[in-house]
């Protein structure tokens, strides 16, 4: 080697070392390390919460599909509400502190009444009918909100997952130095590893604002309780209601001799005071007592707040409103979190957009782990277990749906099916085979759900919600079938190293 | 034709054009081409006006964010179908090979897992306690109305915890980081119990 070549090599080494030690490179490296460590540790739970959350966007439609025999109607009358509250109070041993009447809406054209732990759907004339099923939709929401754990612990964990999601978004963006350079890059034909990497980066970068919103609102749900509990312990002698009242506004106190609630007058006065307000539910506070009063929660056009709450004297006179729409900005923000997280505003279009974004977030979780698996030089059991878990989750959810339709409890079915299926995939020959069988299993489960629903409720299958969900199941089945066919045709492609033969 | 339909058509046209301009301002070989990309960004910002006119400031902003994401993914998908973006000259290849995990002995793997678990335990509960303490400090001492102070604190909590978690996991010096976190908790306590 001549001395020129020697100097050239030495200069290159110096240049490379300088590049490596640049502060920016160090930050990128540490962010990448952080992103991988946090993401891999929580991937399973994040995937479960994202998948269930994507489905939970349509929880109203699922509730209607699950109990198609319940009468549906677009409107209500003050008389029907009065009949419902009277019947509910007559059947209750002790009147509840608060009695709720949820009014019909476009997404949920059914009324229901509830108090304490009792709940009934209502016929159009206000008579009590069946109680809502604690079925698959209830299970799905419990899975998304609490991971099937006891309420406080579950909420704390899902709230923490929101924080983890925020952390992953920040580290993901900081770990991507050529973010602008790769803005639209997707190398589909290079290798499985690069495809997964580009999928992860494109889904992640372009969806980051939405994911951050989901993470923040999810964390808010889960962790606001911790903050209030700690604050109450420190400053209000464990009186959490005092702190909650400081944020959401205080309840009112009245004394009245009126025994009946004048719903007709209350609705008329609401129409005068807030013509644009659209009532969504009613709360009868302290029913039957001399401190009883009526609250009507109503949405306001163009506002993200869940509702404004208008308070009425039993004779129907408007007393005040809670200030959720025009009170302190913090109160408005706190009351907007629900709609922001679940996409329940602006009708079905918002739900569809949220479902697309939720699917993207779910894919992001999957592709993140896929990238890590593809980088491993040695074969690991995780190469089979991860795709096994990914495909077993929707399959187990569908099995739980079949069980719920047949009046079995869905949670045990899900909790038994998911680990069994995931472990079973550990005995398969390759990840490609796991994916094929996963798709086949899911296809079978979706068809079972469809067949069970049609078999049980054939005469109600023309109803919009039933048609929507059942057609959705078939379409999803068709997409999976297409994926299955294409995976059989290119079964030789494998992600990551193959399982050793011995 | 109702005014809303016209605004909707106009908004979709502007938003679509913005995304097309952004896509045109990017090439697989050169990355960002400044002028068309900047024009695309400005047009994208203009599209928010249409969404606000249609759905108000609150819904409009969300629709703008979501439709921007979905539109951009459609642009990416369209590029794939056209056979673009297939070059391999990016950082990804070198990074992936550099980051490949080498084989390790079982005992080394065990100690690595121990360290990782310890790190995650510090990033989890300890950092959470620290974030809760600072958030409570915000809630108590921020000169706002109680509702505003509490909601600011509630929104700060995930950000503080996420930030602390990132720093803990990325930190080379775990002991020093743990001491800092513990010191922060200790420093807030007198203010909280006052």
Image: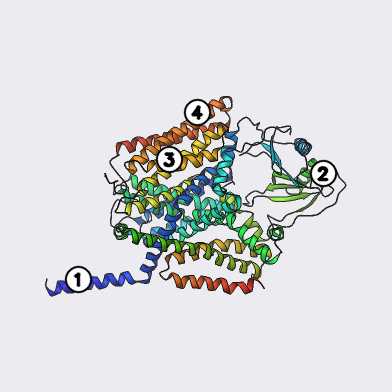
Whether residue A185 appears in this view of the structure is no
Q: For residue A451, which numbered disc appears in the image?
A: 4
Q: Residue at x 37, y 37 (%)?
A: A437
The answer to which of A436 and A103 lies nearer the viewer is: A436
Circle 1 or circle 3, nearest the eye? 3
Alpha-carbon span between mark 3 and mark 2: 53 Å
**Chain for mark 4?**
A
Q: Position of residue A491 (x, y in %)?
A: 30, 39
Alpha-carbon span between mark 2 and mark 4: 47 Å
Q: For residue A288, which numbered disc appears in the image?
A: 2
Q: Position of residue A440 (x, y in %)?
A: 39, 35
Relative horizontal placement of residue A217, taking residue A241 as reference (left or right): left
User: Same chain for marks 3 and 2?
Assistant: yes
Circle 4 or circle 3, nearest the eye? 3
Circle 4 or circle 1, nearest the eye? 4
- Which class describes the residues within 10 Å of circle 2: few (<14), some (14-19), or many (20+)? some
Name the element at disc 2.
loop
**Chain for mark 1?**
A
A496 is higher (above) or lower (below) than A487? below
The residue carrying mark 3 is A421
Sooner in the amino-acid sequence: mark 4 or mark 1: 1
Q: For residue A9, which numbered disc appears in the image?
A: 1
Alpha-carbon span between mark 1 and mark 3: 55 Å
């Amino acid at each position: 080697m001549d001395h020129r070549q020697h100097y050239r090599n030495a200069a290159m080494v110096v240049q490379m070392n300088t590049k490596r030690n640049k502060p920016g490179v160090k930050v990128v490296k540490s962010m990448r390390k952080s992103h991988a460590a946090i993401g891999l540790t929580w991937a399973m739970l994040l995937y479960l919460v994202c998948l269930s959350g994507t489905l939970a966007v349509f929880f109203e439609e699922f509730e209607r599909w699950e109990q198609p025999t319940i009468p549906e109607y677009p409107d209500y009358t003050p008389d029907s509400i009065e009949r419902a509250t009277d019947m509910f109070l007559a059947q209750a041993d002790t009147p509840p502190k608060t009695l709720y009447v949820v009014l019909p809406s476009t997404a949920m054209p059914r009324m229901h009444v509830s108090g304490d732990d009792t709940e009934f759907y209502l016929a159009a004339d206000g008579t009590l009918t069946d109680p809502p099923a604690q079925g698959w939709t209830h299970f799905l929401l419990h899975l998304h909100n609490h991971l099937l754990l006891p309420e406080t612990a579950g909420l704390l964990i899902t709230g923490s997952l929101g924080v983890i999601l925020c952390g992953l978004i920040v580290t993901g963006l900081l770990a991507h130095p050529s973010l602008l350079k790769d803005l639209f890059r997707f190398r589909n034909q290079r290798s499985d590893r690069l495809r997964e990497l580009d999928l992860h980066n494109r889904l992640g970068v372009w969806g980051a604002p939405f994911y951050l919103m989901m993470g923040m609102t999810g964390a808010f749900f889960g962790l606001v309780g911790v903050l209030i509990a700690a604050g109450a312990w420190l400053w209000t002698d464990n009186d959490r209601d005092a702190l909650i009242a400081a944020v959401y506004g205080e309840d009112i106190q009245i004394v009245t001799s009126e025994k009946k609630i004048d719903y007709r007058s209350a609705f008329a006065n609401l129409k005068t005071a807030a013509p644009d307000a659209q009532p969504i539910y009613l709360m009868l506070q302290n029913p039957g007592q001399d401190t009883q009063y009526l609250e009507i929660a109503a949405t306001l056009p163009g506002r993200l707040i869940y509702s404004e709450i208008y308070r009425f004297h039993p004779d129907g006179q408007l007393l005040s409103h809670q200030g959720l729409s025009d009170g302190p900005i913090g109160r408005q923000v706190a009351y907007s979190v629900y709609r922001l997280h679940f996409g329940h505003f602006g009708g079905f279009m918002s739900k569809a957009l949220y479902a697309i974004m939720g699917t993207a977030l779910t894919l992001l979780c999957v592709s993140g782990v896929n990238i890590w698996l593809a980088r491993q030089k040695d074969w690991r059991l995780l190469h089979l277990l991860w795709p096994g878990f990914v495909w077993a989750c929707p399959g187990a959810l569908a099995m739980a749906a079949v069980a719920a339709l047949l009046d079995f409890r869905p949670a045990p079915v899900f909790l038994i099916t998911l680990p069994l299926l995931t472990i079973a995939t550990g005995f398969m020959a390759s990840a490609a085979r796991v994916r094929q069988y996963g798709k086949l299993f899911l296809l079978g489960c979706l068809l079972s759900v469809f067949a069970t629903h049609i078999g049980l409720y054939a005469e109600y299958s023309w109803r919009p919600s039933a048609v929507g969900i059942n057609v959705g199941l078939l379409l999803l089945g068709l997409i999976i079938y297409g994926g299955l066919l294409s995976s059989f045709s290119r079964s030789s492609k494998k992600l990551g190293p193959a399982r050793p033969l011995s | 034709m109702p005014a809303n339909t016209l605004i909707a058509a106009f908004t979709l046209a502007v938003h679509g054009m913005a995304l097309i301009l952004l896509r045109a301002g990017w090439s697989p070989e050169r990355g960002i081409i400044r002028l068309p990309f900047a024009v695309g960004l400005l047009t994208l910002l203009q599209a928010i006006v249409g969404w606000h006119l249609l759905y108000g400031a609150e819904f409009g902003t969300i629709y703008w964010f979501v439709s921007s994401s979905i539109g951009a993914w459609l642009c990416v998908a369209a590029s794939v179908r056209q056979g673009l973006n297939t070059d391999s000259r990016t950082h990804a290849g070198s990074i992936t090979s550099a980051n490949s995990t080498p084989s390790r002995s079982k005992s080394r793997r065990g100690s690595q897992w121990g360290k990782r678990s310890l790190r995650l335990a510090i990033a989890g509960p300890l950092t959470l306690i620290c974030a809760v303490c600072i958030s409570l400090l915000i809630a108590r001492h921020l000169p706002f109305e109680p509702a505003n102070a509490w909601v600011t604190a509630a929104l700060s909590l995930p950000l503080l915890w996420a930030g602390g978690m990132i720093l803990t996991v990325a930190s080379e010096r775990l002991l020093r980081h743990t001491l800092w976190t513990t010191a922060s908790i200790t420093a807030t306590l007198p203010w909280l119990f006052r």
